[in-house]
Image (tube, rainbow, N blue to C red):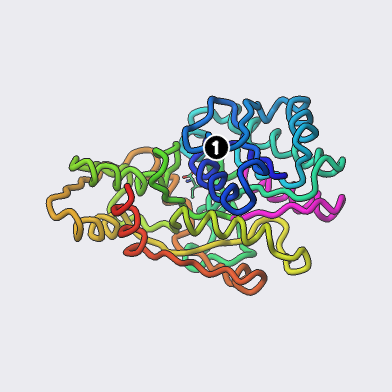
Amino acid sequence: NILVIGACGQLGSELTVRLRQIYGADHVIATDKKESLDQLSEGPFEIMDVLDTNRVKEILKKYQITEVYHLVALLSATAEASPRFAWELNMNSLVNILDLAKEGYFKRLYWPSSIAVFGPNTPKLNTPQETIMDPNTIYGISKLAGERWCDYYHKKHDVDVRSLRYPGLIGYKSLPGGGTTDYAVDIYHKAKAKQNFTCFLGEDTRLPMMYMDDAVRATIELMDAPADKITVRSSYNLAAMSFTPKEIYQEIVKHYPDFKTSYSPDFRQAIADSWAQSIDDSVAQNDWGWKPAFDLSKMTQDILTNL
Ligand code: VAH
């Protein structure tokens, strides 16, 4: 059976629904610290604080879990407001889960990293899999440290942990979750609601982005790949597209000619400026056949049709 930790989050809610479609609702146990969501109602749900190791052990045994998706973290902007709690939550939860894998409570672990592991001195264009990484946000520091713990536990204890450095993820089924890339989620809601949009990043801020459908598929394809195909046990670079607030606005205005936007950069501009602008994911393509399906125009079409 599969356990999703953080099932009510932006990624967790969509990943849980997809996993249940593939493996059957009863085989995918959704957990979160807070109450469940309507879209998770057709399968088992448990309230669980990932930092409560005894509670995690109880759930792993109760449902005979073999695979864990540990998705809990404070995202970049939120983490800057609570650095110590973000470090404790993002790091202690991962190390707890890695120890449980090492002790044999389950077989395979997925844990998300991010382009936030790249920093001001990382090459910004076609950022390679192996490169300088000097993140200057607590979120990025916690994801970089987490990658090192994953690689260490794979090499020292043969833990089958797999990870992806997600670009900014854009999904329309949940509201923005405290990420620096979440302007690209909010802009669609505002366009659909016929409201004007104010972007918290400058119009030319280019960032790597990915439609949630692609991110969910990449995650499941990586977890289904044969172990001998996986050459990266820190975290794989993963890419689909890169765009600026101006470019996404110009795509949306094709559908909503009266839609207006303005730009008033805030503290999140400095976070965005420290990150890579485009990602080289050739290692993921070569190891397990990664191929994105959505570009900006196809994503915009899909979101505005379904929102
Ligand atoms: C954030 N959406 O903004 C996340 C992501 C690329 C950044 O990890 O914090």
Residue shown at 85% from the left, 54% from the top: 158
Horizontally, residue 228 falls left or right of residue 27, namely right
Q: In screen coordinates, is 285 left or right of 126?
A: right
Q: Main secondary structure of the magenta part?
A: helix
Look at label 1 and name its amino acid.
Glu
**Residue at the limit of the structure toward the left, as seen here:** 258
Looking at the picture, how far across and down is residue 36, in whole percent?
A: 53, 29
From which residue to which does the magenta span run? 142-164
Q: Quadrant of residue 224?
A: bottom right
Q: Nearer the viewer, residue 96 or 59?
A: 59
User: Residue 237, percent across and down?
Assistant: 58, 61
Image-quadrant location for residue 53? top right
Residue drawn at (61%, 43%), measured in percent from left and top?
25
* Extreme residue toward the bottom, this view: 286
Mark 1 surroundings within 10 Å by alpha-carbon count, few (fewer than 14), some (14 through 19), many (20 or more)? few
**Would you place residue 111 above or below residue 126 in this image?**
above
Position of residue 99 relative to residue 158, above or below, is: above
Q: Residue at x 30, y 49 (%)?
A: 202
State left or right for residue 161 relative to residue 297: right
Q: Which residue matches tag 1?
A: 42
Quadrant, the N terminus: top right
**Residue at disc 1, secondary structure:** loop
Q: Is residue 176 magenta?
A: no
At a point 76% along the width and 35% down the height, the residue shown is: 60
